[in-house]
Image: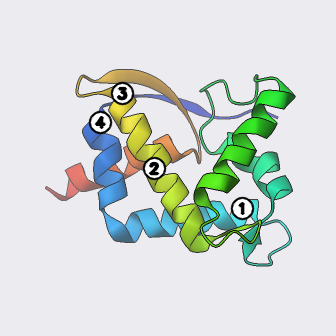
Amino acid sequence: MKTSVVLHALNDSTVAAFVDDTTPFEKCSKECFDELDVDADGVLSREELRSGFGNLLPGIGYLSQPKEELNSLHDAIFERFDADGNGVVDRGEFKELLREIMLGVARGIGGSPVLVALEHGSLLMRAAQHEHEQNTKE
């Protein structure tokens, strides 16, 4: 399967502005949640998260990690974001997860532009598209 990749210069404001713009970020969160929620029950099980989480932020080495490390990561995600402790992540919990991840990425990128290879549909690609749309409105 061939994935389309685009080179784009990002900085922290590209990502933070996307997260702060409530309507497009909520739309993105819903779309990502729906992609992961394969049984369409309105919550993400550990297996659904394991199966699709790496597709949200490709290129950060997620999928190349040993299975034990990924399992530990998924356990940490559930402990951190399963606010009601029911063993699944609902839409609100998932949106908060995406928000924290994206703002963490923004802090990691910093204020200087960084050239990044973005895969179609990834969270960072959506942030770049949001920035482009905002710039064309001005």
Instruction: Return the disc, 3 or 1, that comes first in the chain's sequence.
Output: 1
Q: Nearer the viewer, residue 66 or 137?
A: 66
Q: Amino acid at mark 4?
A: Asp
Q: Residue furthest bottom?
A: 41
Position of residue 3 in the picture relative to residue 103 (left or right)? right
Mark 4, Cα crowd under 10 Å, few <14 / some 14-19 / many 20+, is many
Instruction: Return the disc, 2 or 4, that comes first in the chain's sequence.
Output: 4
Number of numbered callouts drawn: 4
Mark 3, Cα crowd under 10 Å, few <14 / some 14-19 / many 20+, is some
Q: Which residue is mark 4?
A: 12
Query: Is label 3 in a helix, a strand or a loop?
Result: helix
Instruction: Return the disc, 1 or 2, that comes first in the chain's sequence.
Output: 1
Q: Which residue is mark 2?
A: 100
Residue 74: quadrant of the picture: top right
Let me know if residue 132 appears in the view. Answer: no
**Could you tell me if the residues under marks 4 and 3 are in contact, i.e. CB atoms within 8 Å?**
yes
Q: Quadrant of the C terminus?
A: bottom left
Give the percent coordinates (x, y) of residue 26. Answer: 46, 69
Q: How far apart, in angstroms, are the residues tagged by discs 2 and 4?
A: 13 Å
Mark 1, Cα crowd under 10 Å, few <14 / some 14-19 / many 20+, is some
Q: Which residue is mark 3?
A: 109
